[in-house]
Amino acid sequence: MTASSEQQPVGFSLRKYVSGVRERWIDYITGVMTKRPCCVLGGAFSFFVVAMVVLALVGTKQTPPSEYEWELPFDKFSERRDMIQSAEDDVDTGLLPTRSDETYDWYFFFDAKPRLGRNVCEGPYGLLSARNVQAMCEAEREFWGKPKYAAKFCPIDTVTGECMVPMNSISRILYGVPDNTALADAPSDFLNCELPDQTSISTIWETEIHVDRSTYEENYEFFFDNKAYGRGWPCRARSLMYIGTPLEGKEKVSQWDDQQYRKIKKQFVNRIQNDLIDKYNMKGKPARSVYFDEARAGEAGEKFEVLWWNPFLEDEQFVEAVNSDFTFAIASIVFVWVWLCVHTSSFFIGSCGMLQILLSLPISLFWYRVVLWRRYIAIMIQLAIFVILGIGADDIFVYVDAWKQSKDLIEPQGDDEPDDEYLRRRVKYAYSRAFQSIFNTSFTTAVAFFATAIAELVPIAAFGFFAALCVIMNFALVLTVTPCIVLIHHRRMTRKKTNPNSRVPTLELADAHDDEGKGIDEEAEVSTATVKNVHVDEQAPKASGCCCCPPCGVCARCCGRCWNADWVRWYLSFVMAGNTNKFAIIDTALHPEAKTAPDLAVTTKEVDELVEAPSSRVSLRRKPVAVVLVATLATYGMLMAAFASRLTPPSEQEVWFPRAHMATKTDKLFEHGYASNDASYYPELSIIWGMDRIKRGKSFDPYVPHKSRGDVRYSSRPIELHGTAAQTQIFNACNNLPTFNCESGCDGNTLVRPDSTLCFLNEFQDWHEGTYNASIQGLGSSVFNSRLSEFRDTTTPASEDYSSWENYIGFVDGELRFVRLDARISMTLEEPTTAKRMVLRRINKFLSRHCRDVSNSGLPEVWQFSYAWIWFKTQRALVNGLLIGMTIAFPVAFLTLVAATQNFVLASFAIVTIGFIVSSVLGLAWMLGWALGIKESVAGVIVIGLSVDYSIHLGHMFDAGRHEKQLYAREDKFVFAMASMGSTVFAGAVTTAGAAIFLLACQLTFFTQMGILILSTIVSSLVYSLFFYMPLLYTFGPEGDFGNLSAMKHAVLDRGCSRCCRKDDEEYVR
């Protein structure tokens, strides 16, 4: 061949170029860390200080809870709600009478159901004994008996102008107080809650309440439990009272968290609740709300339980529980700190590592709040703390274990080699190996969290952003701060273990293992690979204060470090089912320090020979345990996948408190305790003409959902309601809506509740005929609008549920801009999404039939709205977010596994393992009776990020055995992977699980259920990684270069070259 043919031009290789850049960068950064570790730490701390100053200037105020959090900010129903609220602010208002609107509910529940197996509701009176009735009155008197109630907060009757006895008070009925009685004129026995006569109570029950079923259902069904009439006596009762607004000096009805709301809460509600807590001796416990205690009253002090509910209590308890549960993060921090110290065998490294993890949180908050300008900081952000503690500790374990193993896996220090150069080589090895593992896991976990960040729901998106940033910051810190900490610790320990005039370590084990000298390199310092020309006296007594770990064969103060190796040895013995021909390799891999022990049976030379020798094939018949494990866990995973497929969206809104909390008890009583509920229990339906769209300016930020919701824009087409066609359309809607049928999803056969339709036009026509003795048809536009405005300002709706026409006949600046019909849908919020979808279709069908004939009607386009549809869209968004998140996270996890292991077979096995882990977690949620709600949707995506860590670590080391130890048999690579990474994986699992276990002690069910999901994720990940993935590799894993990307590439190129050569030969022969 000619010289020109021998020197072929080398093509550009992107992979080699990137590898070279990475190699040079690692050389540079490890050199800097080795020479100036304190400077690197100082630079990191300086950045932290600057970030905290900027963060303090910007502010980190917690976002207050609001009704807008768990909804889609840009969904059409959210925008329609904002249009309605904006229009209500725009409407012309007359002087609304003070406290004429019954704005805020206050419920009292009296529950005498069986308690602790004892029947406390016995006939013939049940709950209605004289003493029980008196106790119910005493509870109610804490509300209406306060002087401030009548003076400042009692709803005022618009006819009499007085504060009335609450109409829906059960004690009013049982004390025989007539309807429409002024509170000041009520009988003294009722006002003082004197002990009533049992005979009079029985008479009222028998002659007024329990007369016949129609009378009972019409007038009294609301007050008693759903079996009271058939039983003959009630075991449950309730009262409903109101706080009236607008308060004196205000013109509009109070809304959530406005000035009136805060005044009512401070001056009235808080005092009532404190008095009730004192009255019933509710003490509570540390980190436990007083509302977990039962308020018992009645005969013998325990006949029934008193409960109360109001919107103020719900908001207050939520904030209090969040603040209280956050204290459990301290317990998680302490646990992780202790485990860091134990696993690293160093108090210094464990403490600095814990500080590093904690500092990553405010640094992540700096990027989240300042750089990305996300202003939502609430409960979901706090959840990230428990997750990041485990992830950060796992990253530290990977680097520290790589540093430990570098002592025996790199070339020993030469006699003339400077210490700094030797340390640089160790740092470079540990850094390179840790960088690969930590980058793979951090990248996959961050992408999984970012997958939740694209969710339409702001709290989930905020959690995804913040958690992903925390993962990235931990990755950055563990590769800048952790190596410096380990170096400083190593040099400090080396100075203590060396003579002042020599750099060669001595063999004074007592000094090497004293309290201050205990370090991560203890086991390596006595290795013959690094300590040259040191004579080991086999008969020398062991140092005092040490215990000998038999498996290790060396002296150590405690056996914790040896225990890590022992469980790996047990695991290998179990999975390999007696195939001990490789245990010499296991011993050396697990205990490199044991090579100098006099009783060790295998020498280093013999081990090298075993490693280099070709492995004998082990048939499947000799791997019974591994085969059974793979088959069993695969079957279990498929079964749990079937269970997970049965998860459905929640049929009700999230329950935030445990069953024992008063808020949850009252919710259950609302749902199942009574035969009928107040009209407000059913969602309101609004049919609106005249509103076109919502205009939101640049100031609207979905991450600050309670501010700058936008301004309504009314239809350009005016409302010509004086025309016959327009009136006919609205009359048709008013008359047909109460009778429009509903086949599925409704309580009855009609779309709306009976007698719940509010039609302004019907009542305006009756008023006009009574006032002007004329029909409204045929009036001119100006006359019609003038009289409609008069009707709006001088009358109130016939229904007691509404106090004014202002928001239903929308005059803005004297011009009629919108009109509105209201009714109550005969469907509860707890209906499943399938039922809600059917009801939504029926409403749209009604609109298309009766409300959308706009040709020459004089009416603009019509649309409908209900709060039920906002929650319906939230339920669908939870499912869609989970599906989209998995669609993103699974492919990214697979590609990351391929890049990490450079082997398609390993990556395929790992992605199947991850799929089984996700199925196990979601299947467990179904078995526990949970729905596919907020917690499950978040966990379903982040479980991918958490579960992929162990598979990547083990798969990466399985492949590393090929090029680091020239191991080609699957059995050898299996042992090498477990020996190198088994204890790291286990330590990471313990840390994450330990951090999450304290969530189980929280008050909010959101935290406790997330704790269960995270724990199940960690347990499933550990079980499937160790007892499915690794036995699968041990049984069917790739051998040699099978499945390796580089080998496949070369095989393709070689095949192509061979074809070219064959063609050339054929040409030559011809």
Image (tube, rainbow, N blue to C red):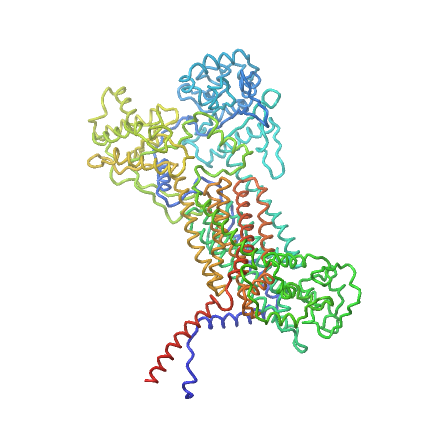
Residue that extends furthest to the bottom in the rendered view of this protein: 2
Q: Position of residue 6 (x, y in %)?
A: 43, 85
Location of residue 251 with respect to 485 vertically, above or below: above
Quadrant in which residue 323 is drawn: top right
574 left or right of 495? left
Q: Quadrant of the N terminus?
A: bottom left
Q: Report if residue 467 is visible in the image.
A: yes
Q: Position of residue 364 (x, y in %)?
A: 52, 55
Q: Could you say which is closer to the camera, residue 1020 or residue 773?
A: 1020
Q: How many marks?
A: 0
Q: Position of residue 522 (x, y in %)?
A: 69, 64
90 left or right of 496? left
Q: Position of residue 976 (x, y in %)?
A: 58, 64
Q: Could you say which is closer to the camera, residue 281 or residue 449?
A: 449
Q: Report if residue 369 is visible in the image.
A: no
Location of residue 755 with respect to 39 vertically, above or below: above
Location of residue 704 with respect to 18 vertically, above or below: above
Q: Residue at x 62, y 32 (%)?
A: 283
544 left or right of 932? right
Q: Could you say which is closer to the camera, residue 604 or residue 934?
A: 604
Q: Quadrant of the C terminus?
A: bottom left
